[in-house]
Image: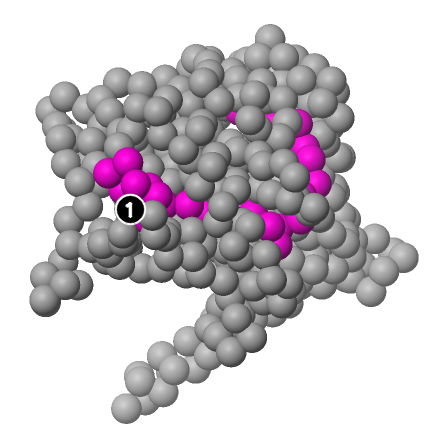
Amino acid sequence: MTDGHFVVIPVTVEDVLYCSFSSWYAKFGKYTISDAAIFKPLPKEFVAYLESDGIELPKENKKDSVLFQDAKPNSDNEYSDWEESDAGILKNSEKMNSDPTEHFKSFHNELKETIKSFGSVAPKLNWSAPQDSTWIMTGRNMKCFSTSDLFLLLKSSDYVNHDMYHAFDETTDYDKANPPKFELELILRKWVDINPSTEFRCFVRDRQLIAISQRDLNYYSFLDEIKEEIMEKIFMFFDDVLMGKFDCNSFVFDVYIPKPLKKMYLIDINPFQRSTESLLFSWNELATMKPADDDVDIRFVTEHNSGRFASKAHSQNHVPVEFVNASVDTQSMIDFLKKCKNMELENSDSDDSSNEETERL
């Protein structure tokens, strides 16, 4: 808010399209940290698979995802007295006889070959990576070793849904009668381990770099010592690489500067709009701040404010810890489902008792 008014951030359909991965990667791919394979356009059968309810993985390598390994009660464990209806919770996949990849075999083979050639990959669509669904992965990251990992991440992500249906919701020139046409794309980037402490998000408004935020919201004491060097390197990268070649006037870009701060890598480019995470800034600040031409507001998590950012990123997409633990252990999954079933029965009994009391009254 400014003077009690909500600040409108103007962003056009064209601005959003410029930030689509294949659009900016064509110009700046040599500045990124790893190779990327872009699949575009996507087969309509694969898009239909992403749109479908439920999570069904390729039959040939479903075992690669621990969450979907079969767990069946038997005489060797304490749940051997389960009724068939109880055990049925774990057998949903058995009811699905068809392999989802049967409808896009050729494309599935392309994905497998790409993953094999890269060793492991990190996926994203045009604008968003499925970071909100990493809780379901054993490594708690986006590192995929198989198409099962890949599909599990994509099918569990709300961010993927944003790219498919809501990418232009904030644009000022959006016409519902004539929605913008774009090709949905899948990008597989070769996995590279990076140190999150030196990844930064940079905000550009009207061709001016106005703000820089630490990307990972944890406290790193050494950042203050290298603050001036970080600012200088980001300014140079923006002036020499992005400002004259990127077609957007306002945008957000992420960079990684590994120690000893000799190199800089472009990680991503996003639209200058509220759905892009503003991290240590508010969007009203970013829309109204008026820095001098040679000034930029750079912010780090400090020892004094670290408690404000203690919650994990994408926590709104997280689930009970019992389910997270169960996702990496078959027996834990049995325990978790048994607990859920008991709670369901207890709630049912409670409702019945309440109804009986009401009838007596």
Q: Residue furthest front?
A: 294
Residues 223 and 150: in front is 223
Q: Quadrant of residue 163?
A: top left
Q: Quadrant of residue 360?
A: bottom left
Quick check: can you spot residue 141? yes
Q: How is the image coloured?
A: one colour
Q: Residue at x 24, y 38 (%)?
A: 206
User: From which residue to which does the magenta span run?
Assistant: 187-210
Residues 124 and 34: in front is 34
| Residue 84, position as x, y percentages in the image | 67, 52
Specify few, some or many for label 1: CA neighbours under 10 Å numbering under 14, 14-19, or 20 or more: few
| Residue 266, position as x, y percentages in the image | 52, 33
Label 1 element class:
loop
How many labels sit on residues?
1
Quick check: can you spot residue 17? no
- Residue type, mark 1 in image: Asp
Residue 1 against residue 286 in the figure, above or below: below
Q: Is residue 100 magenta?
A: no
Q: Residue furthest right?
A: 76
Q: Is residue 158 left or right of residue 339?
A: left
Q: Residue furthest top?
A: 106
Quadrant (top left/top right/bottom left/bottom right) for the N terminus = bottom left
The residue wearing badge 1 is 293
| Residue 165, position as x, y percentages in the image | 31, 33
Q: Is residue 150 left or right of residue 27?
A: right
Q: Residue at x 75, y 26 (%)?
A: 119
